[in-house]
Amino acid sequence: MVEAVDFRNSPCATIFPTMRATLTLSVILLALATYAQPYAIGSRNITYFDAARNRNVPCEIRYPGVSAGSNVDVASGEFPVLVMGHGFAMAVGAYANLWNYFVPKGYIMVLPTTEGGLLPAPNHGAFGQDLAFVATALQAANTDAASPFFGKVAPATALMGHSMGGGASFLGSANNSSIQTLVNFAAAETNPSAVAAAAQVVVPTLMFAGSNDCVTPIPAHQGPMYDALTTDCRAFVNITGGGHCYFANSNFNCDFGEFTCSPSPSISRSAQHGVINDFAGLWLDHFLKGVPGAYDAFSDSLSASVRVTGDITCGITTSIAEADAAPAVRLGPVPADQLLVVYGAESGMPVRVLDALGRESMQLQLLPADGVLNVGTLPPGIYRLLLGDGDAVVVRSFVVAR
């Protein structure tokens, strides 16, 4: 097992002193690869229109850019989407800590600015619908030639949120199978109830809480939500000494509210950010990118870290690393639609396909002689292709998009 590591400084300087004897080479390579060649951060303001509700949803977007700055072109590649809901009376700029970490790693972060005022009181239900709608809008942008995100959006999306936005992320995720995962921070109970909505969430869910959160204490907020979850995969990360507002950068409205109650956070804001980055980074790398070893590193870290206490219930088996025993084996096209071609594989090799949860989605007796697999029955998402059996398994990741 390995304790989660704070990677904000030099990767080599922080990884190796905290390694345990059982840390695998695949996890080391994962950590190093995560921080190789970070993307510059581009920014845009775009308002999406939800015709079904006759509602404009203005958003601030941070994305991997060809350079840093406003309205720059999106970098080459396809990137997963993180839709982030803000806290009560908090400007989205408070979450620069999140986009400064995740965008350089190759994620698009979208922050709707709706329901941001003190009066009238925010409409939690509408905000939850905004989060779900924006997730759909970004996926649609991938096939819209007029969008700056045309051809740049991977078929992988997470709904996220902090405090009020955390509760709203449950509302937006209820019975929502078009997203791949839900991640939230110090989620607050909402009206309509986030606790009730949690029972309808169908995707893997990661919840963060702070043990010293006096604004939305765990027994009244995140605890009931986590208990209500019925999804096959859920995890809870309780940051020891963590506070409510320390999930974001300093914000007057949030900080003032936390100042009036107790207990106060007993760790630094930067230390709490480090925990968020380490754990959420591994979780999202697994569920949105299919990075080998990410889930195992998350699970081991949750068990071993002295910075958190937690719980995890997921029927996931992902211990098989991407193999280099057959470097000539590659898959195409990227992404795939109906057909997936396996180049360089020997005819007659057994084939298995696993989804992001490690569940078997397809099994073929033999690889066809022409190396073509029909993946038209698979829903859009990230999959892993296992060729061969025993100790000779070759693993490759692929994406299905339509």
Image (cartoon, rainbow, N blue to C red):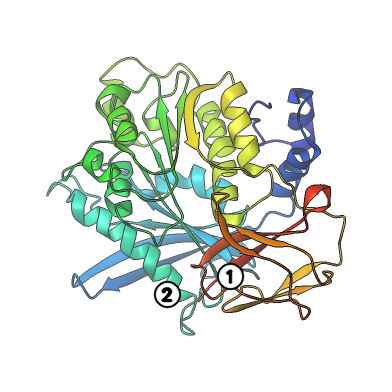
Q: Which residue is the site of mark 1?
A: 74
Q: CA distance from mark 1 to mark 2?
A: 16 Å
Q: Which of the pair 79/357 is nearer the observer? A: 357
Image quadrant where residue 197 sits: top left
Judge whether 63 appears above or below 374 on screen.
above
Q: Along the horizontal axis of the image, is 227 left or right of 183? A: left
Image quadrant where residue 245 sits: top left
Residue 263 screen position, x and y as percent: 34, 14
Q: Along the horizontal axis of the image, is 119 left or right of 110? A: left
Residue name at image x 27 percent, y 41 percent: 164
Judge whether 251 appears above or below 128 on screen.
above
User: Judging from the image, what secondary structure is the residue with disc 2 in?
Assistant: helix
First in sequence: mark 1 or mark 2?
1
Q: Residues within 10 Å of mark 2 (few under 14, many from 20)?
A: some
Residue name at image x 60 percent, y 49 percent: 285
Q: Which of the pair 290/305 is nearer the observer? A: 290
Residue 337 screen position, x and y as percent: 57, 77
User: Judging from the image, what secondary structure is the residue with disc 1 in?
Assistant: loop
What amino acid does circle 2 point to?
Ala
Residue 182 screen position, x and y as percent: 41, 47
